[in-house]
Amino acid sequence: MAGEKVQLLSAMPSPYVMRVEVALVVKGVDYEKVPQDLSNKSELLLHSNPIYKKVPVLLHNGKAVCESGIIVQYVDEAWPSADGGNLLPADAYGRAMARFWADFVDKKVFDALFGTLKASKGTEEEKKAAEENVVAVMSTLEEALVKGGEGPFYGGARMGLVDVMLVPLLAWLPAIEELAQLSLPWASKLPCLEAWFAASKAHPATAVLPEPPKITEFVTNVILPRFAN
Amino acid sequence: MPSSDQVQVLNTWLSMFGLRVVIALKAKGVHYEYLEQDLQNKSQLLLESNPIHKKIPVLIHNGKPVCESLIILKYIDEAWPSADASFLPKDPYDRAVTLFWADYIDKKMYDAGSRIIRSPDAEQRDQGKKDFIEVLETLDGALGDVFGGGPFFGGQSIGFVDIALAPFLCWFEVYEALGEFKVWEAAKCPLLSKWAEAVWEVPCVKEALSIAPPHKLVEFVQAMRKKMQAGS
């Protein structure tokens, strides 16, 4: 749209920022990324998100939207797609289901994965428990994909809300698998999720995601030292 | 919606999240069956309707379950649309702002309140009190700066944030009893205190909140604490 200014306050390698960026690309919105230094927060960030002082923040013609799940749904509504390209389906129950799974991804998935990083510095028991937690969460995601019917995405043939919320896994999961030495039962227990990964990787919108080695570097240099005793 | 609609609510009187759903259904004039659940002995219906989290509230609409209170509120708003009783504004930006503040309540209010109730020592309880007061003062600020001053967050009539927040009012007496303070004396909330009086008088809110009378909640929590202290 002419005259629209869309800025995304970002920071590498926040998975929450990645969700918003992929949503913007899927919806075909022109935007400017404004990387933030989280160790020295800008006036713009503090003014736009005074409550949490975090990224991502979407600035649409100067007006701030915060919290990644809320931003993604805002992007869907502010730039409605004509041809069934919206992230949420039209029917109320379908929307409730998509929101439920988006909420599950938000509350359970990344916490479980970060838990394995923490546990990688802990005892064998802690490592085992953390890996079992990830397998349980992934199995739940697998079941949801199977029950949903048409794939390869949670949104069906096209990416929807849940896919956009989950897509930062493309950048993060390989790094975490390597650093926490996770072995997930892809072939035996998670075949639909494996297919989801392949389809998401091939989707043009995910080209904006950082390559896993960059995440590995960040985790090694910044996150793991925090967990060292 | 056809009168053959079947609507059930799985809840417990102890949940402020479930009361949100009751307020919303009453606000829309939807007939529903209220099914009080025993969370120590979860029913087949609950376990089947919410296999992932096994929690209440659950809304079951013609056999299809919807879980997570704010998701249920959005569903009720969309499944029973009405021009004059919409919970969310029409404009996408205003909606995003409204949802932000409902999410803030979810993230901050319950946690701070819980810490007043459950903290094993005075220091943690005092921190819970401090945080709780800060949440109220932040909401008071938002009511003034973001939502036009009231009387409600929804303007002249209740909306999404009002429904999300109102049930916590039942628990204020519990926080006061255990935290040994008076909420509206400790927290500087000129707008929010007025809101609390006004919202309780809204018929659908008053009816819903009568499920969890404050004095009964105080009795319940004090009995629970006695039991736990006797057991240790």
Image: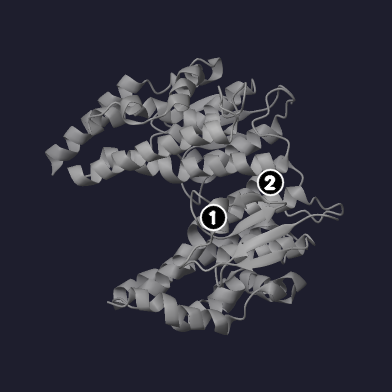
> At 30% from the left edge and 42% from the top edge, which residue is drawn?
B128
Classify mark 2: residues with Cα within 10 Å, few (<14), some (14-19) or many (20+).
Answer: some
As measured in the structure, the alpha-carbon distance from the residue carrying label 2 to the one carrying label 1 is 14 Å
Classify mark 1: residues with Cα within 10 Å, few (<14), some (14-19) or many (20+).
Answer: many
The vertical placement of B31 against B101, above or below, is above
Tell me the quarter of the image containing the N terminus of chain B. Answer: top right
Left or right for A95, reference B59? right
Left or right for B60, reference B197? right
Q: Which mark is residue A104?
A: 1
The vertical placement of B120 against A14, above or below, is above
The vertical placement of A20 against B222, above or below, is below
Mark toward the start of the polypeptide (2 vs 1)? 2
**What x and y, as percent, mark residue B30?**
64, 23
Q: Which residue is mark 2?
A: A95
Q: Which mark is residue B200?
A: none
Amino acid type, label 1: Phe
Residue toward you, A91 or B98? B98
In this rendering, do the residues under marks 2 and 1 share a single chain?
yes
